[in-house]
Image (cartoon, rainbow, N blue to C red):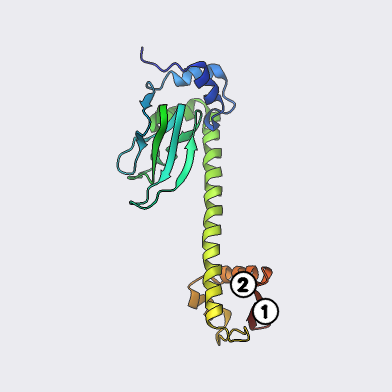
């Protein structure tokens, strides 16, 4: 029939994929047999774009895909390059997402197997190990994104605080702000714990000295 039969090279690549970690080759072959034949994308062709995308994971069997941020006509940032054994489109399955936030295209001819939600769910039931692999992967992604958010918002608070202190500092570097730290947090529209963290960071970096309620910028 039209079932998928990966080449030795493709099988090698798939065994490195996070999804199939610790899945025996025999099991992997029977799993892949359930998938529709891979789609071929020629160099420059789009695999996913915000308005039209397949509600499925894309498993790269050979070739290379590039993931770029979709920034309405602005310079697009390259977010990732995917080779054989890599997966993308995690946000295209499960849930009600109507748009895809990045664009993925082939940088060279590529063969891609699509794994839909029904297929994934069936696999999760039949092979609990696969579900565990998928959960571990998503957990890593969440941790990574949480770190990014903390870095981004933390940095923002710190820079906003620094500008505010500079604006309120005299020639001697002493900050003239009559209110309390609660007032300062309100003025900057940030939480108190974020403000305390930002003050500590500025102090640790030697940009700010605090004596009691008095603050001096360096």
Q: Quadrant of the N terminus?
A: top left
Q: Mark 1 touching mark 2, by CB under 8 A?
A: yes
Left or right: 89, with 218 as reference point: left
Q: Position of residue 199 (x, y in %)?
A: 62, 72
Which one is in front, 41 or 212?
41
Mark 1: secondary structure = strand
Quadrant position of residue 43 = top left
* Disc 1 from disc 2: Cα separation: 9 Å
Return the mark for residue 51: none
Quadrant position of residue 115 = top left
Mark 2: secondary structure = helix
Q: Position of residue 141 (x, y in %)?
A: 52, 44
Please determine whether, in this image, residue 81 is positioned above or below residue 21: below
Residue 28 appears anywhere in the view: no
Residue at the location (36% across, 15% down)? 2
Give the farthest residue toward the left.
Answer: 51
- The 10 Å Cα crowd at callout 1, few under 14, some 14 to 19, many 20 or more, is few
Please determine whether, in this image, residue 94 is positioned above or below residue 6: below
Which one is in front, 80 or 95?
80
Q: Position of residue 51 (x, y in %)?
A: 30, 43
Return the mark for residue 199: 2
Return the mark for residue 210: 1
Which one is in front, 12 or 34?
12
């Amino acid at each position: 029939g039209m079932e998928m039969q990966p080449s030795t090279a493709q099988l090698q690549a798939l065994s490195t994929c996070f999804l199939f970690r610790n899945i025996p080759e025999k099991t992997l072959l029977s799993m892949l047999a359930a998938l529709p034949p891979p789609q071929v994308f020629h160099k420059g062709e789009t695999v996913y774009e915000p308005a039209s995308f397949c509600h499925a994971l894309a498993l790269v069997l050979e070739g290379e895909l590039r993931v770029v941020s979709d920034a309405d006509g602005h310079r697009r940032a390259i977010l990732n390059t995917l080779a054989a054994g890599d997966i993308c489109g995690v946000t295209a399955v499960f849930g009600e997402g109507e748009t895809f936030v990045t664009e993925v295209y082939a940088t060279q001819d590529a063969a891609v197997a699509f794994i839909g939600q029904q297929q994934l769910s069936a696999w999760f039931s039949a092979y609990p190990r696969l579900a565990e692999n998928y959960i571990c992967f998503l957990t890593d992604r969440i941790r990574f994104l949480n770190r990014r958010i903390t870095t981004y918002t933390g940095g923002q608070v710190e820079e906003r605080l620094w500008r505010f202190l500079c604006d309120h500092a005299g020639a001697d570097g002493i900050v003239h702000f009559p209110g309390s730290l609660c007032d300062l947090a309100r003025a900057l529209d940030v939480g108190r714990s974020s403000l305390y963290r930002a003050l500590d960071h500025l102090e640790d970096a030697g940009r700010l000295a605090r004596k009691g309620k008095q603050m001096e910028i360096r």
